[in-house]
Amino acid sequence: MHGFEQTPLWRHTLAPQSTDDPEREPREHLRSAYLQFRSTVEPLAAEISRSMPMFTDHSITHVDALWDTASLICGESFPLNAAEAFVLGGAFLLHDLGMGLASYSGGLTAIENDPQFDDLMASALARLRRTDPSARGAALERSAREQTVADLLRLRHAEQAERLVATTFTTSDGEGFYLLQDVVLRQTFGSMIGRIAHSHWFDVSDLRAFEQPQGSCIDHPTSWEVDPLKIACVLRLADAAHVDQRRASPYLHAFRKPTGTSHDHWYFQERLTRPRVQADRLVYTATRPFGRDEAAAWWLAYEVIRTIDNELRRVDALCADLDRPRFAVRSVAGADSPARLALYIRTDLWEPLDARLRVSDATQLIANLGGKDLYGNKPEVAIRELVANAADATRARRVHEGDYGGAATIRLSSEDGEWWLTVEDHGIGMAPETMVTALTDFGHSRWLASDMLNDFPGLLGKGFQPTGRFGIGFFAVFMIADQVEVRSLGYDEAPRSTHVLEFRHGVTGRPMLRQADFHERLRNSGTLVRLKLREAPRTEEGLFQTTNRRLSETELLHSRMTRLCALSDVDIKVQGPDDSQPVRIIQADDWRRISRSELFRRVYRREEASHLDRVVYDGYEKVFIDRARDLHDPDGNLIGRAMMASGWEIIHPDLRWMQPPEASIYVGGLYADEIKFCMGVFCGYPLTADRLRAFPLADSAEFRRWLEAQADSVGEGKWSDPVDLWYAGYLARGLDASAPRLPCAQSTRGQLNAHELREWLQGRGEVLLVAGASVNWFGQAGRSTQFFTFEGIGVEIPDHALIVGLNPAWFYPEEVRPRPRDERFVDAVEPPSGWDARTWWYDTGNFGSVGLVVRTIAELWEIDIVEAVNLMEPLAMQDDCDHRPLLETADGAGLHVTAIRMRRPGTDDIGESR
């Protein structure tokens, strides 16, 4: 006899009753059929552990234990007849079988052919790369595939359970069989058993689909009607509440060695004893307290018990509403607070205070982080986020349909003295429930939600990459507006299904969802966002943040949106107050094929520039046409068109106080950030959720290739002068390029590149590296360099001195590529005062132009870097003493400069080799 046959629920229904039981024969029939059903399922349930080894027990042991847990929850007087018990037992048997690959006739191939497989695989790869950016190749692919298979098995197991009663399995000799072999019972109850097994994955509210009872089997007593709703409730409660030692054997834990959250699941369930019933509550206890190192497992137990409590309460409410029998157990002791649960599941030497991160004032958080506190005083970000959403929806429809060329349209209009901004798309649109979650749940990204993957399978697998990924962008609209209206029509829906979500008081009021009036209906799927601007657009606080009257609102709209959307892969249209109809300003992805001149003018808009800026842009346009080069990703896709620029190429010497130029970085085709000492455009990826920091997509090899090519063109170009060359070298080496043709140091002979530096060093036993921040200089092509104090007084530089930047810049963001550090000096410690060569080299000196200079010195002196650094003599302010060398000046006053002196081993005091 099996253990479950001793449970009250079994004994009252399927077990033999009294000798004069009038229903003995049909009861024996059901009991025999169930035991056969169970014996056939048992080996299939054992296969689950092969597919999901990290999960707690889902074998026949778990199924048998559900009879016991259900008995506790139902109580002694719960009305359940033998036919209902048989159906319940069948649902117990089937409900988790879909978690094993063996339950799928097609095995792994069936899972890999699932419409969501590619989406989940793409998501797993992205997740693993975020966890370990260095992960590559077959190992990464294998790990992502394993995660995807596990995710899909868990996602599909409930619906697969519904199919299994009608599935034919085949023995080794080709004979077919069913899990439930009794034909009459399979035909009578098979469909119901499958649907109830599926239902344990439903939301409680969806159980109303089982509201109608089924009449009795023709071979059963009339009173043996079957209520599927009642049975579905028993299944979900018993399954939810079964968390104890029977599901987490310590021996299996030792063999499988689960990690992460799986480990915590095993750990807490291994400690929980069989729950008991006290009044109308389940009471969970543990065999021993949870210590400090086991706190994570305790908190997971708390969350699981809260879930069980919530299930019990919701099911009880459903049964009360539908006049169904109520269960004996309706809540869990201690679920209402960690301190109360600790009375039953004890902790050791720590207090279970609920110190989770929480938001006390969600409205204020959204107002802050959705607006200026996140994005700063940048109202144009509000348009960018709306356009990003519109572009994502349009791109999603294009991927889904395979051929769709919709546009995002931006309108600015004045109505009765009020300014209105509208952004519209004809993408996939949103159903009413999606509008609510996507536009009111701060931090919820619709593109990664399960309903999106279900409604549009294959999007991620086909390469769809949404620009908006964090669920915060829409809230940027409240920086510029309080009154916002969103109309949307879901894909493949009729116009009458258009719904409107209205925000009448920003984030402080409760939004209202309603069906669109006739005149508000959208004729095609898509979304329209309309907002009343808080300030007139052409004010310092307005959308354009300008009081310039030279351009109209329409001209400003065209200019700003052209630059903002310059790399968009969907068509962009705008309509200002002076436009009779929308005007297309960007054709999808045309930046890849338009001329360099047109691209330059698109990004560096001349309409709003001052006369001086326009002169500068006219000069730079010529340089850009001559020097800009393309960047590509590993698949050969164009991801940049740019050039290096110091900022002085075409600037008159009298104007060299101007800021260096910057290239624009675009994320999802929309402006995000800039990179100094370049001009042009780069496709990039965001470094922050607000997309105000970004970096080019090019990998280090491609970026270095482009930099080296730029360095060569700068060194040979007709536009280059010594200042231009100096800053180009500064940029290139700050991005880890060698740039051998660009200068790395200044000498009395002029600028020195890598080859010239080697020639200059020949025969020298002493070198003085003078900090470039100590002196000013001026150079012209073909002439020696002149040095000055910052007051303009001439300085005499010793013949053995090199002017170098002792603190080079590292232009990569640290999260993209940390600055290189020489780990041989990792133990070096900065002294309390003064300057130490070893710490300087470890943190700063070993890259950039100065790194190239020091390595060249070490190579020519035939010493290693460690010895070279140890030879360095810092000449700086040290311990209130001034060790800086004094250089002669034209006025006789002299100039103290910070420097590093290096003497070759075996060199005398006057710098000559012995």
Image: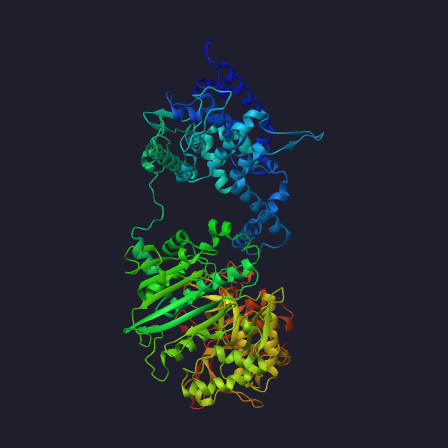
Q: What residue occupies the far top of the structure in this picture?
A: 19
Q: Would residue 570 be found to the left or right of residue 630 on screen?
A: left
State the residue at coordinates (33%, 57%): 366
Residue for point 52% across, 30% down: 250
Q: Determine whether 754 is above or below 349 in the image.
A: below
* Place of residue 799 in the rendered image (x, y in percent of width and height, measured from the top left): 56, 84
Viewer can see residue 776: yes
* Foreground of the two, 886 or 288: 288
On-image quarter of the C terminus = bottom right
Residue 450 on image: x %, y %: 48, 49
Residue 224's image quarter? top left
Task: Decide if residue 840 is in sight here.
Answer: no
In this image, 522 relative to 901: left or right?
Answer: left
Q: Viewer-proximal residue, 47 or 577?
A: 577
Asked which quadrant contains residue 909, the reply is bottom right
Q: Residue visible at 46% across and 82% down? A: 775
Image quadrant where residue 377 sits? bottom left
**Which residue occupies the foreground of this view, 83 or 857?**
83
